[in-house]
Image: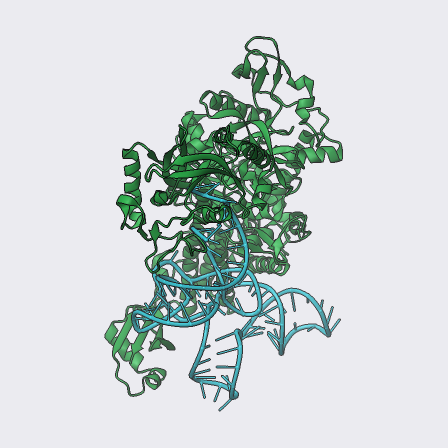
Amino acid sequence: MRAYDPKEIEEKWQKVWEDNNLFRVEEDPGKKKYYLLEMFPYPSGKIHMGHVRNYSIGDVIARYKRMRGYNVLHPMGWDAFGMPAENAAIQHGTQPAVWTYNNISYMKTQLKRLGFGYDWDRELATCDVDYYGWEQWIFLKMYEKGLVYRKNAPVNYCKLCSTVLANEQVEDGRCWRCGEEVVQSELTQWFFAITKYADELYEYADKLPGWPERVLNMQKNWIGKSYGVEVDFPLERGGLLTIFTTRPDTLYGVTFMVLAPEHALATELAHGTPYEKEVHSFVEKARSQDRSFRLELSGSKEGVFTGAYAINPLTNQRVPIYVSNFVLAEYGTGAIMSVPAHDQRDFEFAKAYGLPIVVTIMPEESVLDAALMEQAYEGDGVMVNSGPFNGRQNREAIPEIISYLEGKGIGKGTVNYRLRDWGISRQRYWGAPIPIIYCESCGVVPVPYEDLPVKLPLDLHIKLVGKSPLSECPEFYQVKCPACGRDARRETDTMDTFVESSWYFLRYACPGYKEAPLDRKRVDYWMPVDQYIGGIEHAVLHLLYSRFFNRIMNELGFVAAREPFENLLTQGMVIKDGAKMSKSKGNVVDPDYLIERYGADTARLFCLFASPPEKDLDWSDKGVEGCHRFLQRVWRLIIDRADTLRNLPATIEGGSENTQSEEVSRLVYMIHKTIKKVTEDLERFHLNTAIASIMELVNAIYKFIEAERKEGELQLLKGVIENLILLLSPFCPHVTEELWEGLGATGRVIDRPWPAFNEAYIREQRITVAIQVNGKLRDTCEVERDLDEAALKQVVLSLDKVKRHIEDREIRKFIVIPNKLVNLVC
RNA sequence: GCCGAAGUGGCGGAAGUGGCAGACGCGCUAGGUUCAGGGUCUAGUAGGCGAUAGCCUGUGCGGGUUCAAGUCCCGCCUUCGGCACCA
């Protein structure tokens, strides 16, 4: 018999799909749409196993939805700007563009060889002028709306990448890409005002039921919303010091105040006091320390007295003002009130500098004595030493304290966020140029829309160290000011590549559109994305930026949806030998090798079967072989009897009760049950168990054909096999097409509707009921479905094992879970 | 410290609402086919006791609710992820 030759049949069917443009879609208001998206890859050279997994999951869903009659948009493109292209250009003496487009072309053939069904007519690469030109257009619109601004600010700088990084791109004080330690530095940079959306992004996190909770939690953590109050403390020598606190219930316990070294008042307050010099040198020292250094100092809280005092507006007590490195300039107001009795940091500072401690909250079960405390009490309790609030539960009193402060005009309920604006300037070459011109007389001048796009020069000598390559390219930066016509200088920084990935999913809806970045009508047909699939590593970065960007595009009138992604699936990593599969670990398995040796269908099947999509996948060469063996088994099952079955009619309907054998009804039951199970599993992404149940079906079919079968039974066999092929087809699209053809079935699998099941065949007439005595399983017994309780009781009590376990005790309870289980309590 | 997820055979993993724990696959054992290897087919495979029938124990640990708990509740432990001097 003909052997299974994946190579031959995979090439054959890929060509058929391509020649017939089977995955090309158009907007069709008469059809239900389904927008399925997987995170697009960076064209690093070759696809890796993580891609195979990600795109296999997506392809199964796309093909399944297609069979269910949806108009499925399943696009693919390239996140093509970024550092590696510059590194490669230096290493290989080539151009980033050449390197990138070569990689794209190779990786595209790899994706095709895996049989993924994309609408390649919508393909885009973010380094295409057509794409980043429109991004510059969006930048200008955002500039007009005040959503982009330039400021001098402390930034994260990676020396290895020679560029600034966003806060989101710093992981544990290191560069997210190269792992180099990030240093603090002061630079004038462009920022996107994502903080304007902090509250909405935070609140909507609870309105995304289709997202994994863990991702939403990470985003909420990152945004870091906290409710509190801003309180004005009058300064002894005039003026106010405003602080932010989430614990107004501890206001009566304030014994000192602390300013961040960067706070404007820090040196001002010390001016003219004996402490002036000391404060000055302290501030200078703190400013020169970068963030990672300050982090290492956590614990050692250093500070100096400013010589100034503030007045606690509730107690009228005079409290000293300090400057210390433990207060962050960028959070709240950059100044805090200190309550050492009820805040551990304040407590440590107070102990170190001999400052008083005043208890204002008494725990339920003990009595606090300020003199004996070894740490702050941060829990709840009853308020003491707190004027009109004495005796109140601190938590309950907070809202009243806030109103009290507001009533007296000394405070205001406020919300604070941890989220900072998104710094997007990168001192790199391979990115979208920021469309801005600096003119000595006109200042910052946006590039006029008609001058877009600002194209990247392609023939450039790239260096990694020193200044950005564009800043050393006069042909690029020497321009005339669009406003006054005099000599001016073009911005030479490029945009963070995360800007490109923040709106690519919108552009897929209307690729090549010439009038604007997006065509509202087409975008509204497809958006929002029904299902997004990608790695958990983007939980905060890309996914938060995209939510922000989609809002901007919504406000610019390009899309009706406020949130871009309806449902999100974050797939786990691919692990081998206990570590993430990666080049640096040397534990990679090359997809090309897998395809060559086992074929794409096996590679796909293993990635989907070995674990549920959202969990990490433990790579196993043996497991791959197991999957290959399964496909061989399916192949033999069908090809070996294709001649016999070819001209027979096919059915999966059972015959009449009395004429059909038990084996026939068993097989009818199995096929209907499997269709149901696979359908339900696909709907909830339990792809591994869907495959498991298909395997069970195959085992059942083998069992069925152990005996010689009559013609009527062969019709059933054919029907079952046809449905088996349909069920398996989203997972293994090539081999199933080939088998379908071999069986002489109608049309192509891909164009067939998804199989339907009949619930009546899944209801078995005879049921195996589990019998428990006092909650322990003692026997099972087969009975008629829906047997009434009295009859059931009679059957059960007649069982030997049951009798033995009951002995002569009286039956106190007889619990029946219909058609499932019986529990006798005695 | 705060927020979250997860702990089930030798391994990957099953068990939508509490109802026969270990589906499916890998591995292993025995046997058939074969000169042999590979392949393939059949049977077995949570642990312990037992010749069999069978009995006992078992889902990280300790309690609890329930006729019945991997699943629910309380208290721990471990691992992983996010945030972290955020006031």
Observer-nearest residue: A722 or A369? Answer: A369
Q: Tell me the quarter of the image containing the C terminus of chain A.
A: bottom left
The residue that appears at 26% across and 76% down in the rendered structure is A813
Which x, y percent locates residue A20? 55, 37
Residue lying furthest front in this view?
A274
Residue at the image position 41 percent from the left and 43 percent from the top: A255
In the rendered structure, the colour chosen for chain B is cyan
Q: Is residue A313 left or right of residue A175?
A: left
Visible residue check, residue A526: yes
Image coordinates of residue A595 in percent, x first then y, are 64, 49
Q: Nearer the viewer, residue A221 or A806?
A: A221
Which chain identifier belongs to the green chain?
Answer: A
Measured as percent of width and height from the top left, residue A536 is found at 52, 46
User: Which of the 4 image quadrants contains residue A197?
Assistant: top left
Q: Residue at x 28, y 33 (%)?
A: A408
Give percent across and percent down for residue B56.
Answer: 43, 81
Evaluate whether residue A122 shows in this view: no
